[in-house]
Structures are given as C-alpha cells and as structure tokens.
C-alpha cells in the first residue's frame, strides 16, 4: 500500500498484492562471509533496524522503509551486483550499500527484552508501506539518505558527479532543535593539518570562516607568516564548495574526507597555535535527512509528505509491477 497522505494508518494491501510472492534478496554478510537469502520485506526490516533508531516516530520509520526498499529495488531491477565481493549476492550489509541487521541477530538480540517493542514498531513500519517504492520516470530512484543537515540538503552534483532531478537541495530546518551533536568541533595541530591535507611546511592560515549570512569573512592575518585561507564558494546546500588553504584549493568534500569530518558544512578558526574546525550536521547531505524526517513526523507529517519533500517529483509505485516487467 502506498503511504497515505493523511495521518490514518495505510489500508491493507490489496489481496492480490498480499498474495504475490515477494522477490528474494541475497545479502553478503561481511563479518562471516556468508550469504543470507530472505524475502524482500524481511530484508527491509533488517535495514530499518540498522539504519534508523526504533525510537524515531512511526512515520519517519515508514519513510525510511520506503527509501530502503527503493534502494534494493533499483539494484534488483537493474541486475546490479556492483560493490559486492561475491557475484551471487545482490547487496552487502555495510554502509557502502545500506547497513543491515541479519535475521539471526534480530531474533537473538531484538525479539525479546528491551528491543522487543522497537522490533514490533519496525515491522509495523515495513508492513504499512509493504511493496511501496519511489520511482521517477518509471524507474526506481537512487534513494540516498544521511543522518542530519545543518539546515539544508544538497544538490546531488555537489557531492557526486551527476545532477539528478529528484535529488535537489531543499530546506531542512526540522532537525536543528532535536539532533544530538548537531555541531561538533575538532582541533588539529598545524603539523597534523599539513600532513592530512598534503600542504608544505609553512605556517597555516589564521582564520577561514563563514559569517551568519553565509558570506566568506575576511581573513584576519595574525602574522606575516600566516598563509591565506578563504572560503571561495558555497554549495546550494550551504556547505563549503571550494576553500583555499595555504594557497591550495580544495573542495569541501576533499577537506571532509582528508580530515575525517562529519560534514562539509564547517567553520575553521585558529586558536592558540591550533586550528579548530566545527562541523554542522552529519553525512553527505544528499536526499533524505533522517533526523529531519523524524522532526517532520513529530510535527504530524506523514511518510508520504516526508518523502515528497526530500525527493523532488517522485511517484509511489508497487515493486511487483516493476519486477513483472
């Protein structure tokens, strides 16, 4: 059943859809090297358990279930086995695809005790969205998601190469009040930064930060040996697009990856001979913000409304109709 636009529970799936055999998913379990084969909806439950806290609102969990189902549907329809160590598996259980908790672990660690209610809620979210995926021009979308933003999601081409019409930058203010550790600071010594960024041995910049308006602030020069550091441009999602550090230009993504930062939305300032970098949000920023989805659900938004906000112009489709093709 397609998630409903009202807050009422989704109606049961039509009898034909309920009886239709589910496609099977083969998952490569990275720790054991074994392959688990299971029905699609059970796979979605395992992804949901791994990718979103069960304490989140039901409508946020339903939105995540649709995104997870869409992700695997895209691979199944395309016969895509990329990134899996063995050719007979559809997908791995790591974040290089989407994280997944195996059925054995769900039964052992979730089916009784403190996580029991969480597992029931996850299974309800999967059942109430059963078979539903997102499509664009008739094909399953790349349903990317991430933990939290600093207020905006990102255009796909700012992080990956391709401009994807449904992965557009949108405002995402809902997480700002509820996300733990929205802002996280890191302190680096000059030598650490030089080494990680591949810079020379000269002194590092005094300051490079963004003002509240998002404009690059003038760089304050504390000494004649300071090298210039300047934010050259921002992305549509208010992250660092290009920054010049010590005369070398980096993308925000490069700095994030080289320094192991949570996000490419950051400020940078010199303190007592070291550099303090403060990041906002967590993840690449493309697609659905999980904490944003939870914030929307807390305000009464449905899974359908959440997904239509984060994925521009998508349609909801039953997976069985696609796989029949």
Image: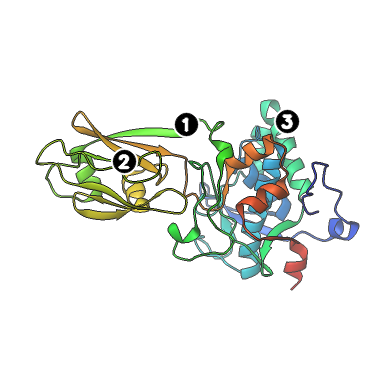
Query: Which residue lies most toward the top here?
Result: 114
Residues tagged 2 and 3 counted as in contact (Cβ below 8 A): no
Where, quadrant-wise, is the C terminus in this rendering?
bottom right
Residue at screen point 31% across, 41% down: 209
Residue 201, position as x, y percentages in the image: 12, 46
Residue 89, position as x, y percentages in the image: 58, 61
Total marks shown come to: 3
Q: Which residue is mark 3?
A: 117
- Disc 2 or 3, which lies upstream in sequence? 3
Left or right, residue 171 beside residue 125: left
The tag on residue 181 is 1
Vertical order, 85 against 202 (above or below): below
Question: Which label lies toward us, 2 or 3?
Answer: 2
Vertical order, 36 against 164 (above or below): above
Residue at screen point 51% across, 42% down: 151
Left or right, residue 181 beside residue 165: left
Q: Which residue is mark 2?
A: 209
- Disc 1 or 2, which lies upstream in sequence? 1
- Within 10 angstroms of label 1, few (less than 14), some, or many (20 or more) residues? few
Residue 223, position as x, y percentages in the image: 11, 37
- Disc 3 or 1, which lies upstream in sequence? 3
* Residue 259 picture quarter: top left
Residue at screen point 81% across, 53% down: 1
Query: Which residue lies most toward the right here?
Result: 15
Residue at screen point 47% across, 40% down: 281
Left or right, residue 282 beside residue 266: right
Vertical order, 131 against 182 (above or below): below
In this rendered view, identify the residue nearer to me: 108 or 66: 66
In this rendered view, identify the residue nearer to me: 245 or 42: 245
């Amino acid at each position: 059943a397609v998630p409903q636009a009202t807050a009422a529970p989704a109606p049961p799936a039509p009898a034909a859809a309920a009886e239709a055999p589910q496609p099977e998913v083969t998952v490569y379990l990275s720790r054991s090297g074994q392959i688990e084969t299971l029905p699609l909806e059970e796979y979605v439950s395992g992804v949901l358990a791994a990718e979103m806290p069960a304490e989140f609102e039901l409508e946020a969990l339903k939105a995540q279930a649709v995104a997870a189902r869409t992700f695997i549907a895209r691979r199944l329809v395309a016969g895509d086995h990329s990134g899996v160590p063995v050719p007979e598996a559809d997908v791995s259980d790591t974040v290089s695809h989407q994280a997944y908790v195996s059925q054995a672990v769900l039964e052992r660690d979730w089916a009784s005790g403190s996580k029991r209610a969480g597992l029931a809620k996850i299974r309800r979210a999967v059942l109430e969205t059963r078979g539903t995926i997102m499509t664009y021009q008739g094909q399953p979308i790349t349903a990317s998601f991430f933990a939290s933003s600093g207020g905006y999601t990102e255009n796909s081409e700012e992080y990956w190469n391709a401009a994807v019409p449904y992965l557009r930058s949108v405002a995402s203010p809902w997480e700002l009040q509820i996300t733990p550790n929205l802002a996280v600071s890191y302190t680096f010594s000059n030598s650490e930064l030089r080494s990680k960024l591949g810079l020379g041995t000269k002194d590092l910049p005094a300051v490079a930060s963004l003002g509240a308006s998002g404009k690059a602030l003038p760089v304050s020069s504390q000494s004649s040996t300071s090298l210039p550091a300047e934010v050259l441009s921002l992305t549509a999602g208010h992250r660092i697009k290009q920054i010049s550090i010590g005369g070398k230009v980096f993308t925000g993504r490069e700095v994030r990856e080289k320094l192991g930062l949570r996000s490419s939305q950051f400020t940078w300032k010199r303190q007592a001979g070291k550099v303090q970098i403060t990041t906002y949000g967590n993840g690449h920023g493309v697609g659905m913000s999980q904490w944003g989805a939870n914030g929307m659900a807390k305000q009464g938004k449905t899974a359908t409304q959440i997904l239509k906000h984060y994925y521009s112009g998508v349609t909801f489709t039953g997976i069985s109709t696609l796989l029949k093709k």
